[in-house]
Image: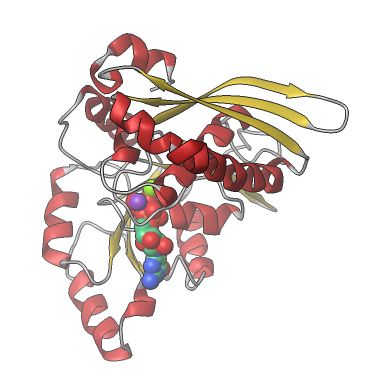
């Protein structure tokens, strides 16, 4: 008997959704950062094992729509709610259980739910058993599974639980598929992750990245990308004194992209100012939101 299905990962920002997806798929699919709202798109990761295939979706955290960008992000959350076979509701074990359960209740899910207690590496044994006991009182979950996505603990138990809830079906994707996203997309995401690492406060939230050129040459891959910001002052910060910051961004991004595509890369970065890109539908479409 072969099982296959769609599993969506929900949770508050920073619960560890992207870390979990990466731990399960074993590739750096979703960018991870300690800042909230790093994940702007739905990212699919496909796990194929003998006997089953699971298509996971990481979603942006559940947030209030403040900008048009946020509305699109919530749209991604809603569409994910409607097409899953199983929902993983994940929370930070150090965060308030009550608050998270209240949020999960408000989703009104009709699919089987697995409540995932993440970051158990931050709890003592006593704290963990107290939390598990309380979590099991919530009647909406078919199962409660404690894990540490970061330390890859509890993932086997989680997979067994997921597979037990999947319908009988043939695989949806060829067995070597890891994701439905393009390499260009991941290249842009890697650069975005590095912007989160290098620049403080609001800069990363006002920034998006588009790959304008992706050319496989004989000995290397030539990539051109635009870093889009909303103001001249932000452009100046990203460039840095005499271009120092953009060079650093280019270097660390290139190194990571080379690891990801396993080829030498020539990376060229340009910074462009496009006022209010976050509130402009045309821009959002152009940038793939
Ligand atoms: P998301 O917003 O839900 O996608 O959360 P991320 O996957 O981006 O993770 C947010 C932060 O939590 C990052 O700094 C992760 O390294 C951290 N994190 C994720 N999983 C764990 C875990 O199991 N244990 C600990 N201690 N930290 C974790
Ligand atoms: K995050
Ligand atoms: Mg994320």
Q: Which x, y percent locates residue 39?
A: 38, 41
Count all numbered tags in the image, as a single digit. Answer: 0
Q: Give residue 124's quadrant in the image.
A: bottom left
Most extreme residue toward the right is: 218
Residue 136 in sight from this viewpoint: yes
Q: Give residue 237's quadrant in the image.
A: top left
Question: Where is 255 relative to 243, above or below?
Answer: below
Residue at point 70% right, 44% down?
258
Picture quarter with the C terminus: top left
- Please name whichever residue, 246 or 37, is drawn nearer the observer in this view of the structure: 246
Q: Which x, y percent locates residue 210?
A: 50, 24
Residue at point 37% right, 29% down?
235
Most extreme residue toward the bottom is: 126
Residue 5 in sight from this viewpoint: no
Residue at point 19% right, 62% down?
139
Question: Where is 163 relative to 92, above or below?
Answer: above
- Please name whichever residue, 26 or 175, is drawn nearer the observer in this view of the structure: 26
- Judged left or right of residue 259, residue 76 is left
Question: Where is 271 relative to 189, above or below?
Answer: above
Quarter of the rendered structure image containing ligand 1:
bottom left
- Judged left or right of residue 27, residue 113 is left
Most extreme residue toward the front is: 242
Q: Which x, y percent locates residue 78?
A: 27, 31
- Please name whichever residue, 212 or 160, is drawn nearer the observer in this view of the structure: 212
Most extreme residue toward the top is: 282
Q: Which x, y percent locates residue 58?
A: 42, 43
In the rendered view, how is the structure colored?
secondary structure
- Judged left or right of residue 193, residue 222 is right
Residue at point 53% right, 59% down?
23
């Amino acid at each position: 008997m072969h099982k296959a299905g769609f599993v969506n990962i929900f949770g508050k920002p920073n619960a560890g959704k992207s870390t979990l997806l990466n731990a399960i798929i074993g590739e750096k699919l979703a960018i991870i950062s300690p800042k909230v709202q790093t994940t702007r798109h739905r990212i699919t990761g496909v796990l194929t094992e003998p006997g089953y295939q699971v298509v996971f979706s990481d979603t942006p955290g559940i947030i209030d729509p403040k900008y048009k960008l946020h509305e699109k992000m919530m749209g991604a959350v809603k569409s994910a709610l409607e097409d899953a076979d199983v929902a993983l509701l994940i929370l930070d074990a150090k965060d308030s259980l009550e608050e998270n359960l209240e949020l999960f209740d408000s989703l009104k899910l009709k699919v089987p739910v697995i409540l995932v207690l993440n970051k158990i590496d931050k709890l003592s044994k006593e704290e963990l058993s107290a939390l598990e006991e309380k979590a099991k009182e919530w009647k909406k979950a078919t199962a409660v599974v404690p894990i540490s996505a970061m330390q890859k603990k509890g993932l086997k138990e989680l997979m067994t639980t997921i597979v037990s809830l999947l319908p009988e079906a043939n695989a949806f994707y060829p067995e070597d598929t890891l994701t439905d996203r393009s390499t260009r997309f991941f290249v842009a995401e890697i650069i975005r992750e590095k912007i989160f690492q290098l620049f403080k406060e609001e800069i990363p939230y006002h920034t998006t990245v588009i790959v304008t050129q992706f050319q496989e040459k004989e000995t290397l891959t030539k990539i051109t990308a635009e870093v889009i910001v909303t103001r001249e002052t932000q452009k100046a910060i990203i460039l840095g004194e005499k271009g120092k910051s953009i060079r650093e961004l280019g270097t660390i991004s290139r190194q990571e992209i080379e690891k990801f595509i396993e080829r030498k890369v020539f990376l060229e970065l340009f910074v462009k100012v496009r006022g209010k890109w976050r509130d402009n539908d045309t821009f959002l479409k152009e940038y793939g939101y």
